[in-house]
Amino acid sequence: MHEDLRRFIEHGGGSGSGPFDSRVSRLEDKMEKVVGELGDVKVNIATLTERIAHLPSKGFIVTTSATALALLTAIIVFADNIKALVAG
């Protein structure tokens, strides 16, 4: 631990112009990039939320499927009557 402290002081740790300045500068640059990318992520999430809001609901899908199934069943059950009506 004393060795680390000695190296810190020898490399300008006390003056503010040591190796930490470059590291802090790199971290600041990276944080600016992260902030910019977070803005893009927020826009993408808002877009997805809006798209999801316009998807059909579960109730609509179930109702539509049940109606289609009922119509198909009615056509199959009354196929002979429909043929007779069309033919004649």
Image (tube, rainbow, N blue to C red):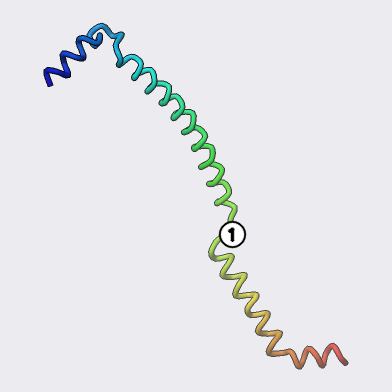
Q: Amino acid at mark 1?
A: Pro
| In this picture, residue 46 sits left or right of residue 18 | right
Within the image, what quadrant is residue 55 found in? bottom right
- Name the residue located 63 percent from the left edge and 78 percent from the top edge: 69
| In this picture, residue 15 sits left or right of residue 87 | left
Q: Determine whether the residue tagged by mark 1 lies in a helix, strand or loop.
A: loop
Which quadrant would the N terminus be assigned to in this image?
A: top left
| In this picture, residue 9 sits left or right of residue 50 | left
10 Å crowding of disc 1: few (<14), some (14-19), many (20+): few
Within the image, what quadrant is residue 75 found in? bottom right
- Name the residue located 65 percent from the left edge and 75 percent from the top edge: 68
Q: Is residue 47 above or below residue 71?
A: above
Q: Is residue 75 above or below residue 61?
A: below
In x, y percent, where is residue 83? Answer: 80, 90
In x, y percent, where is residue 29? Answer: 43, 22
Question: Furthest residue to the left?
Answer: 2
The residue where tag 1 is placed is 56
In x, y percent, where is residue 20? Answer: 30, 16
Within the image, what quadrant is residue 81 found in? bottom right
